[in-house]
Image (tube, coloured by chain):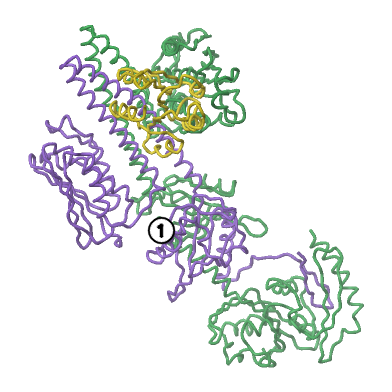
Chain colours: A purple, B green, C yellow
Amino acid sequence: MDKRIVIPFTNKKTLLSLRKSKTTTKKAPEVSVVGGDEGYRLFVEGVKEYAMIMLDMKGYVIGWNIGAENLLGYKEKAIVGKHFSRLFTQEDRKADKPKLELEQALETGRGEDENWLVRRDKSQFWASGMSTPLRDKAGNLLGFAKIIRDLSERKELEQQKDDFISMASHELKTPLTSIKLYAQLLHKYLEQIKEEKGLSHLTKIQEQITKQENLIRDLLNVSKIQSGMADYQVQEFNLDSLVKDTAKELEATAPTHIIVVVGKTSHKVRAIKEHIGQVLTNFLTNAIKYSPEAKKINVRLSEDKKSVTVSVEDFGMGIPKEQKKRVFDRFYRSENVKTKSLSGYGLGLYIASQIIKQYKGQIKVESIEGKGSIFSFSLPHAKQK
Amino acid sequence: MKGQHSKKVLISEIGNLRKAINPQADMGSSHLVSQKIIITQSDESIHIARQEKVIKLKEAVTLTQEYTNEIISELNVINEEVTITRDYADAIVRTVRGPLLVLNKDLRIMSANEAFYSAFKVAPNSTENRLLYDLGNRQWNIPKLRVLLEEILPEKNTIEDFVVEHDFKDIGQKTMLLNARTLRQGPDKASLILLAIEDITEKKRSSMYTRSLIEASLDPLVTISPDGKITDVNEATVKVTGVPKEKLIGTDFSNYFTEPEKASEGYQQVFKKGFVTDYPLTIRHAGGKRLTDVLYNASVYKDDKDNVLGIFAAARDITQRKQLEQQKDEFIAIASHELKTPVTSIKGYTQVLQNRFQKEGNTKAVELLTRMDGQLNKLTSLINDLLDVTKIEGGKLQFQEGYFDFKALVIDIVEEMQQTTTKHTLIKKLAPAKTVYGDRDRIGQVITNFISNAIKYSPHSKKIVITTSEDKESVTLCVEDFGVGIPKDKLDKVFDRFFRVSGLKQDTFAGLGLGLYIAGEIVKRHTGRIWVESDGSEKSPPIGRAALSSGRQGSTFCFSLPIKKGIRKNQTNTLVEEEMKHE
Amino acid sequence: MSKARKKIMIADDDSAIVDVLTLILEDAGYIVESTDDGRTIKDIKEDCPDLILLDIWMVGFDGRVICKYLKGNEPTKDIPLIMISANKDIKEIAMKAGADDFIAKPFDRQDLLAKVAQLIK
């Protein structure tokens, strides 16, 4: 591009260099503000690994650094004035994610999210974005600042872990499948020849096989959920429908029991739905398992000013007093003689308590040996922090 | 550089020009003619165009603000005194894009340009001979400006980058960058003041955005100078270190971490590579107790001349995430442990039944149970692999150390493994017996893994060759197969935790694929070396038909163990030396 | 024709699975043939089985690819095919590949026999 310069005519020699110097290297004390601002401008502009974007109040791009260019492929001129939602995927835009991010920023001081972003060339990458509102001295909203980081590498590692887990699942289940089938074949055969003693041993074997199955499934589910955190979104939702659905599901698998759900809540909780679902499933499975004689299980939904509570009541064997406080421990294994054959390896409750703790909720149990137990958890309302 | 060349041409041309337009050097007429010399940068020659025109800004120039200031500072740099006529001052003023004023020594406006009028919303006719301060209903009566013009300028003759912020009634808050210069008009003539006013309100606003962004960030952000000292921090950094801002600035960045050397290494890396991503560090709170696990992402920032000014570093608080990771790892460790329990009791019951039915002569039952038992062993070994991995990850892999005969171990294992395959013949080419120090079972695990991989990955070939060799320092074992091989670009990844040949799920071979990772860890902890050579092609190994029919490819897996050294006690590099008793 | 014993082909690279499935199916009155090699199954031309049990992952072969091939190939496209996998989540993928049904490991002997009986004719 031609640069035209008008040189004022002087009658002395004038040398004009054509360099552009953006830096004001000489800083008088009273110009420290400029120096500071220049400094920040420099590194915002110079930081290549982070995209630093300025948005106006409505989400239109007004500032774009070189990091943003690198990460997203748009040159400054091409994107300034356009709405930042074009960086999101279609599904995210349909789900109003851009708007929600800004709203969250206004409400809580920062709007954070991890999702797929779309580059200029339509390719996508996994990124973390953080938006903060910017206000003038009077507190008026001027716009938003958004920092984006490329998480592709981490996502790849997580993907690898996921692949590993699903592959491990396959591998572990293969020998288990044939073990199970051999045992079933043997069972049929022993029944045919009426080998009573052998059959009783075999039944034990088959119970253990089921246990093994459950353990493998639990292990892999939890690993999957925890390492697949990125795919599961934190949501605000009402517990009622989750509770009812889970109850129905489990009722279908246990023809011996009826699960009754009472109560309702109006507040929402903020969590990953799958996590809470897991806790519920665990409570209900235990309730079924530990009350083989009884037929009914009661599930209650309730709330108070601060939190929402779900309780699961069974009318089974209950838990001895001394063991009640250890029931959520990692290595807890029911020592109740009657339950020895059913003894869960306690991991389900341990995991459940970890999950609830993570969401700053409470978990507890009330029980009378011989009469039954009530397991309950509560979660804080969504708006409170 | 083009600049240099242009300069030279410029100077000589200006000389020519002066001569050429001399007659018009003295102006006195009210009708001003400005001469413009237009220089095109891209041309090596200079186009000189004379134009007569009534002064209008629009045709002027793409002279940016910076050039305006540049002109003035250039004038300052080159000349002690610049004698300039009033008219030429006017010429400058009118042709320059940015707001520019010429004042006489009484601070009355002699000339103002269009840019000034439009930027500050001043009517053109209201400026002539007006006292600067009186402009716009005394809006320009700015104290700082007075100081500048009345005190600083007379002394210094030039002012650079003087910032004035003022809330104008009519145009709102403006931040202005002032550059001023005294211009002498020659002897006996009063001097003029050239005042360039750059409106940097917008620029400042955008910096303010940046500053707010940085302050608002809940992530601790710091800027570090090239010698590792903190130059600036945000509020989040103050919070996480527990040290006030003034005390942080100027101190060593690495002071605030539990591992200062690791922190220094980190920012050395940034200077070398230009950036660093997800560098793990732990910040220690000044109060002593609180530790915050973070991941640092940092990069250098430079000026336009590509000089590195410093590092900008952002820390991501991962304490929660790390906690979650730890929980998960703990859980997997426990669960893997738990996984063994049912298998153990199944195996127990199975054996009881086997004995029983053997005694009774019930062959069908025995047969079923035997097959079941075989699968139980397989399951157990898979679970063991998983467990080993969790131990490795948790730094808890333990060894039972002792002296053992390496050759004897190899022979034992080869015999064992030969039992597992009818397709392959395991051929031994072994060096003489040698005593080594280490964990016999674990080394055996490595050899078993090599051979079982060789069998697995060459389902259609007939032999596998096991060789051992030795020198003064170490023993080496290699297992060569003639199967599918491994692509060259994957050779160094083969011992990674998540590596799978060809990486495609559908090409999975049985087993968790952890064997090599575990083998690698075992050998490393014995301070040995593990490696692989393969004839695999550059691309992924051919799958399906082609893979199974290819003959001469294959891989050779090797490891070597030092004879004298012992086993690393833990994951860090402290070595336990053991003196070997010679035979 | 429906009185003659039906033939089932098992394609799985795990010998224990093949073994126990053979025992179960033979016990239930079927003739069983098996292979651990993806090539063989693609070469079925005459004497076709009445049902195929196909593992989703075999050494060097993708069960889905084989399934698609069989379902697109004249002599084999009408043979009922049950896909075996370790993961319930794979169900959709299996069905997309054209399988008639799907069974997840570890499964019950009864379940297997029921599915086979339903599809084989």
The answer to whether residue B286 is visible is yes
Question: Which residue sits at x=65%, y=79%?
Answer: B197
Q: Nearer the viewer, residue A95 or B440?
A: A95
Q: Which amino acid does label 1 sit on?
A: Val
Depicted B405 relative to depicted C3: above or below: above
Q: Residue C8, percent across and down?
A: 39, 22
Q: Which of B153 and B278 is in front in this view?
A: B278
Residue B238, image quadrant: bottom left
Q: What kind of element bears circle 1?
A: loop
Q: Residue C107, percent across and down?
A: 31, 29
The C terminus of chain C - image quarter = top left
Q: Residue B567, percent across and down?
A: 43, 24
Depicted B464 relative to depicted B92: above or below: above
- C36 lies left or right of A238: right
Q: What residue sits right under mark 1 in the picture?
A: B243
Give the farthest residue toward the front. C1
Q: Which chain carries label 1?
A: B
